[in-house]
Amino acid sequence: MHTGPPGVGENPNAMQILMTEHWSLLASRGFVYTEAMSRATIFIAALSGSVVALALVAQATDFGSGFVAFALVLLPVDFFLGFVTVVRLMQVAVEDATWIQGMNRIRHAYLELAPELEPYFVTSRYDDDAGMLLSSLGRRKPVGPGQAFLAIPGLVAVVSAVVLGAIAGIAGLGLGLETLGCLLVGAVGLLLGVTVFAILGWRMIRAHIAQIEVRFPTPRTAGD
């Protein structure tokens, strides 16, 4: 079992190298956060414009066949944009976890160089799941499944699923279904969208966990 960077205390340039890498990882986290916010903003802006356009068309056509045709052209584009946005946000979350793991390893090296500083660190020095969780969320226990809907990928996923439900409901309207039938079809589309996004997220998380290389596991009795 690897217990630490070999010779880290013997190299006079070790601290400078570690700090440079630490700042590089911080910059990488900043980039992925910027991309995540930009992606989500683009999707919400496009969807907002589509809703305004649909409202104007609905007023002009009294929810007739013209509205149905316009909606079934416009909303699938919004759903596609939402779908690829969610997938990319999930990838960004995995990338961010990788940068957190790297920063935890560097923190481990810091504490090998200066172990007396350990009481002043609130983030983890271990690079396993527990260590990354502490450094990213400030907690040691795993979060519940509801946490996924509080993060940006989960939020955009739910909105995208609503768009899918709207597509299904409007398609039902075009097929001559009554209001209740359209609502039921829309609800099925919403549940289908949420289920698909949940499966995608779960598979991506499992794939990331399977490929994690842990070098500094959290001790069973560690308070950190």
Image (cartoon, rainbow, N blue to C red):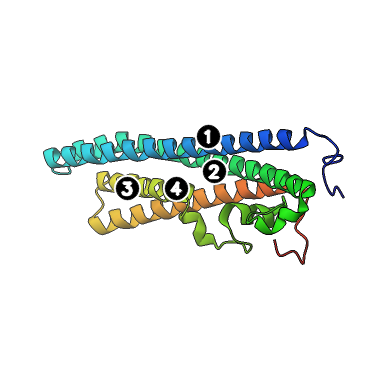
Residue drawn at point x = 52 percent, y = 34 percent: 31
Question: Which comes before the other along the chain, label 4 or label 1?
Answer: 1
Q: Secondary structure at mark 3?
A: helix
Q: Amino acid at mark 1?
A: Phe
Q: Are discs 3 and 1 less than 8 Å apart at CB?
A: no
Q: Secondary structure at mark 1?
A: helix
Q: Which residue is mark 1?
A: 31
Q: Amino acid at mark 3?
A: Ala
User: Which residue occupies the foreground of this view, 199 or 210?
Assistant: 210
Drawn side of residue 116 relative to residue 162, left or right: right
Between the residue at mark 2 and the residue at mark 3, the CA separation in whole angstroms equals 24 Å
Q: Which residue is mark 3?
A: 166
Drawn side of residue 219 relative to residue 58, left or right: right
Between the residue at mark 3 and the residue at mark 4, the CA separation in whole angstroms equals 14 Å
The circle drawn on residue 90 is: 2
The circle drawn on residue 157 is: 4
Question: Which comes before the other along the chain, label 3 or label 4?
Answer: 4
Q: Amino acid at mark 4?
A: Ala
Q: Is any atom of residue 164 visible in this view?
A: yes
User: Which residue occupies the foreground of this view, 52 or 20?
Assistant: 20
User: Which residue occupies the foreground of this view, 22 or 92?
Assistant: 22
Question: Which comes before the other along the chain, label 4 or label 2?
Answer: 2
